[in-house]
Amino acid sequence: MSRRICRYGFLPALAGLFLFGVFFASTSQAQDYTLKDLNEQLVMGTLWYQKSAEMRAISYQAFNIAKLVFDMDVAKGPSEKKRAVVVDIDETVLNNSPYEAGLIDRDTGYPKGWAQWCNAARAEALPGAVEFLNYVVEKGADVFYVSNRKVKFKQGTMKNLKSLGFPQVEDAHLLLREKTSDKEFRRQLVRKDHRIVLLMGDNLNDFDSIFRKKGIKDRLAAADQFKDKFGTMFIVLPNPMYGEWEGAVYNFNWRLSPEEKSEARKANLNTWTSD
Ligand SMILES: [Mg+2]
């Protein structure tokens, strides 16, 4: 009998070790903060973007102000160089929020699936965008789409813009990202033969490179520095889902883990509590 116990006594120990391993693995897994957890924070911004009438109103407001500014310029009479309106694409004239919503509840993030989204050409237009840009062309000015979508997405982007009725969706008017995300060179290309009356975008980099790669404080200071340009030369559209503002929160270290990103976001909140 004792020999048998001795012989098989390692079995309970082995089972115990196995159970401990399972328990340890499951608790450590439960503690892992993944992209799926971080993506929960996308819910409110994306929901606001898609379902608030305020977002819709702000979009109309942006294009109404753009029309006022454009009309005021046209009223000054003939322009030496042809007039141009420069617009960004994503979250300026096209609404990609279904792509963002598709990240929620999933353990994945940009750029996963972005190529498929662009190629599907299913984005909707931002309210007021199609009407305003057609108006610009009717009045004899040109529209330029200066976007950081990569050139490889040109076909899908053109198909999407055309299907929605945007004007001048042609190679010469679509300046996508080739080497750098800095749009200054592309703005200069437009300025060769045109006078830019207005720039429209959801990211301050869409207006001037002075805003690029700056920390939170410097971005805020730069916005103050250009305060007279907003609504007169630069028209901003809202984007609570992503943008360079988010990069500034991470000091542009996009490689932070999901948990570190969440911590950086919360650490940057100005908080008040009563106790
Ligand atoms: Mg954009």
Image (cartoon, rainbow, N blue to C red):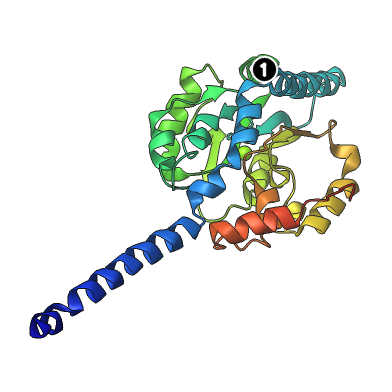
Mark 1 residue type: Gly
Q: Residue at x 39, y 59 (%)?
A: 26
Q: Mark 1 = which residue?
A: 128
In this rendering, position of residue 93 left or right of residue 55? left
Dividing the image into four quarters, tell me where ligand 1 lies: top right
Name the foreground residue: 126 vs 180. Answer: 126
Name the foreground residue: 189 vs 29. Answer: 29
Where residue 175 sits in the image (x, y, percent)? 55, 40
| Residue 212 at least partly seen | no
Where residue 192 sits in the image (x, y, percent)? 68, 42
Where residue 159 sits in the image (x, y, percent)? 43, 26
Element at badge 1?
loop
Dividing the picture into quadrants, the one containing residue 21 is bottom left
In this rendering, position of residue 138 left or right of residue 166? right
Name the foreground residue: 198 vs 111. Answer: 111
Where residue 125 sits in the image (x, y, percent)? 57, 22
Dividing the picture into quadrants, the one containing residue 194 is top right
Q: Residue at x 61, y 28 (%)?
A: 47
Question: Few, some or many C-alpha atoms within 10 Å of disc 1 (few <14, some 14-19, many ≥20)?
Answer: some
| Residue 208 at least partly seen | yes
Quadrant where the N terminus is found in the figure: bottom left
In this rendering, position of residue 40 left or right of residue 154? right
